[in-house]
Image (cartoon, rainbow, N blue to C red):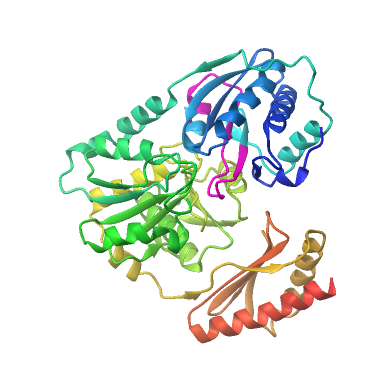
Amino acid sequence: MNVDLSIFREYDIRGVWGKTIDKNFSIGLGLAFAEYLKQKVKKENLTISIGYDARLSSKDIFSSLCIGLNYAGVSVIDIGLVPTPVQYFSLFKLEVDGGIMITASHNPKEYNGFKLSVGKETIFSSQIQDVGNIMKHIEIPNDIPLKANRVSKYDMVKDYENYMLKQFGYLKTYKNKPKLVLDAGNGSGGFVGISIMQKLGFEVKGLFIEPDGNFPNHHPDPTVLENLSSMKKEMETGKYEVGIGYDGDADRIGVVLKNSDMLYGDQILLLFAQDLIKQHKSAKIIGEVKCSQVLFDGIKKAGGIPIMYKAGHSLIKDKMKKENALLAGEMSGHIFFADRYFGYDDAIYVSLRLLEILSKEKIDLIKWKNSLPTTFNTPEIRVDCQDDKKETVINNLKQYFSTKKQELQIVDINDIDGIRFKTKSGWGLVRASNTQPALVLRFEDETNEGLDKLKNLTMKITKDAIKNA
């Protein structure tokens, strides 16, 4: 097949419907994934579960994908329109050999894509490339049927909801539970989340709960400030304790406070870490390299073991398993619980854990946020760098910073993902983007002046390194 391998990315397959992804592509992917699955699982009569998000192309993709899978001997359990966490949940609750979630997460409406799982684990990096290479060498047979014939339906949402009601059911008896706003951005998670919350007795103001692949109200990414204007208006009425937002497939969460401030991904993670460590002394908790030093220091102060690791939700999940960590998270709002859960990123589950803490501990989130050490930081800064130069540039920067350690007053260097160097009052990060021809930089310092100095110096060093690579 003629396949654009650039859409086989680090964590998933993602492209534009009608251009890089179409019905033929979906049939071919079904054939290729079936072959890959057979190589890995090594058994007859394979079955997988497939869910899909609300995008306008998702049902067409699903039908075509099933044709390829069925032709190659793989049966499909159709779990319907669901958020990604419900598809992941099916891997643990059904007798399946793997699964596929059809979604492009928070991308614009013309995009779609695939998250692939073998057994209970999502595949990533070179594993995804392997599927792409198999697909390249496949031709769609002339005798392939026009319709799939080995597809059965299953109501996975009902099982998922019952699981959550069982774990959090005791909260029904709590009085004065926090009132909240839930903004689902017309993605695939709102109708699931709001139903569970209401059955637990929470008063919820729902915004854009109805799945709609046109995303008519705002872009489905709750970590971007401009997407939260409707939620902020509701929070400004003073009726609600917290605002919660989901991305398009509900594996990422955003949190807004009564004063319209946001809790960032690393702050949400620290809140959970402090609560979890009360029950699990010396718990290992993982944060990615872009997280604030406040997170790692806060975990240590609470009695936990902080682990800094590479950015990327699939990489974090893998690291959690290897370290037996109970909790992990990223700046982007991916939060992973292995404590009382399965270790994958689920914004609905995370929102229930947040409501649990607020119900039991009666924490004022504004006061809690204001109690954290004050730091000044930059958002992610992207600097263009050709893909074939990224590794060279990062290696040259590692060497540069190591040799100039004393001159630049660097007290520590971490090279787990690019280079993160620590000074007496802050830190800087330069790493290669996993998804774009760019380097990603981020900085933090105790003062604004120190932040500017750190950023400007590192930007100059980085641009020089790119020029000389």
- Taking the image as shown, residue 170 lies to the left or right of residue 154, namely left
Q: Nearer the viewer, residue 146 or 450?
A: 146
Q: Position of residue 185 (x, y in %)?
A: 42, 48
Residue 260 visible somewhere in the drawing? yes
Q: Quadrant of residue 130?
A: top right
- Taking the image as shown, residue 204 lies to the left or right of residue 92, namely left
Q: In the rendered view, would you say 276 is above or below 191? A: below
Q: Which of 97 and 409 is in front in this view?
A: 97
Q: Where is residue 304 in the image (x, y as percent from the top left)?
A: 45, 55
Which span is picked out in magenta? Answer: 89-114
Queried whether the magenta region covers residue 102, the answer comes back as yes
Q: In the rendered view, would you say 438 is above or below 102? A: below
- Taking the image as shown, residue 47 lies to the left or right of residue 404, namely left
Q: Could you tell me which residue is drawn at 40 percent across and 42 percent down?
A: 348
- Taking the image as shown, residue 328 lies to the left or right of residue 157, namely right
Q: Nearer the viewer, residue 401 or 259?
A: 259
Q: Could you tell me which residue is drawn at 65 percent across and 37 percent down?
A: 123
In the rendered image, which quarter contains the N terminus?
top right
Q: In the rendered view, would you say 169 is above or below 39? A: below
